[in-house]
Amino acid sequence: MGFLEDAFNTYFIEPVVNPAVRGYNAVNTVVYVSILLALAFFVVFPFLDRKGIRFDKRFAFALLPYVLFGSSIRVVETLGYVRKTLNPLEIGFWFFTPGVWLLVFAVTAIGLAVSRKLKGENYHKSFAIIGLIFSVPIILFVASHYKQWLAFIGTIMLIILIGQVVKLLVGRFTKTGLMKDQLNFLAVQGQVIDSTATIIATTFFDFTEQHPLSAGVLGIHPALFLVVKVLLVLLILHYAEKDIRKENLRNFFKLFLIILGFATGMASVFKLGV
């Protein structure tokens, strides 16, 4: 028991409660991702699929404000307004993993339930508006503390440029038509956001990459990080299109990739302005 307690404390407790310890390590990353995958594909998808939710581009765009809410609220910690804690009764718990996941999931579930209750099948606009009600005040609060507007705006412009270049190259050198699907494009764009913001933050500013594997790739060469992430998501999307026969499940899988890319990437983009 002593070994298990020490390991649990080292890999799960210390990264949450100790600001000096990097938030992610190989062990807790694998566990968190495994839990996230299990909940997403064995709980969330079956439930929403039975409720008639279609995971199309309308749903994806309506969901983005909630992703931005989660990304921006993580930046509040960087500003020093909250501290790490494992106590759900303290506000700091809800600004760090895993508390921030629970908060964003709860807000999203409430937004979806309320919008469906009000508008039935035409709920997407209401769903997005509720998400904006939660996300915009946090984003404005974070932006009010910005001192590096050039880094923030410049990174966004670079992300847009790289995303369009990737779309052009994929369309030019492949015949799959992969990027014609809006969900595929958003999934790739999410990885462009994440990798570009991470490269800028770790190369030109005093940021460090928390995930060990990503830090290893960045250590070889920053540009390699972008290339690897884009190629990997393109490969995953290729096999998703080929092997996942059920359209709604295939689109949910793409949405999962979109959320991962945008959530981590936009958190990094928001932090660049601080």
Image (cartoon, helix red, strand yellow):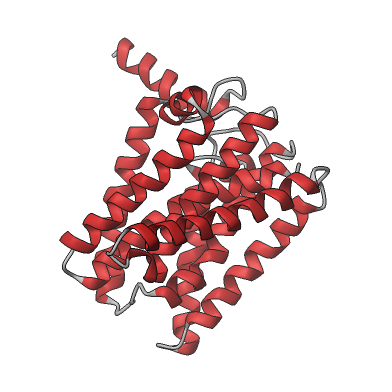
Residue occupying the point 69% across, 31% down: 204
- Residue 257 lies, in percent from the top left, at 38, 54
Q: Is residue 106 above or below residue 18?
A: below
User: Which residue is at a point 57% across and 46% down the rendered structure image?
Assistant: 94
Q: Position of residue 220 (x, y in %)?
A: 47, 23
| In the foreground, 250 or 235 | 235
Residue 42 can be seen, yes or no: no
Which image quadrant for residue 65? bottom right
Q: Is residue 7 visible?
A: yes
Q: Residue 212 lies in what quarter of the image?
A: top left
- Work out whether 157 lies above or below 49: above
Q: Say if 60 sits above or below 30 in the image.
A: below
Which quadrant of the rendered structure holds the C terminus? top right
Q: Is residue 6 left or right of residue 189?
A: left
Residue at 16% in and 67% down: 245
Instruction: Locate residue 235, reporting x and y percent.
Output: 29, 50
In this rendering, position of residue 111 left or right of residue 151: left
Q: Quadrant of the N terminus?
A: top left
In this rendering, the answer to whether 144 lies above or below 172 is above
Relative to the observer, which residue lies in front, 45 or 193? 193
Q: Residue at x 29, y 41 (%)?
A: 34
- In the rendered image, the residue lying farthest to the top is 2
Residue 183 location (% of width, % of height): 39, 67
Marks counted in the figure total 0
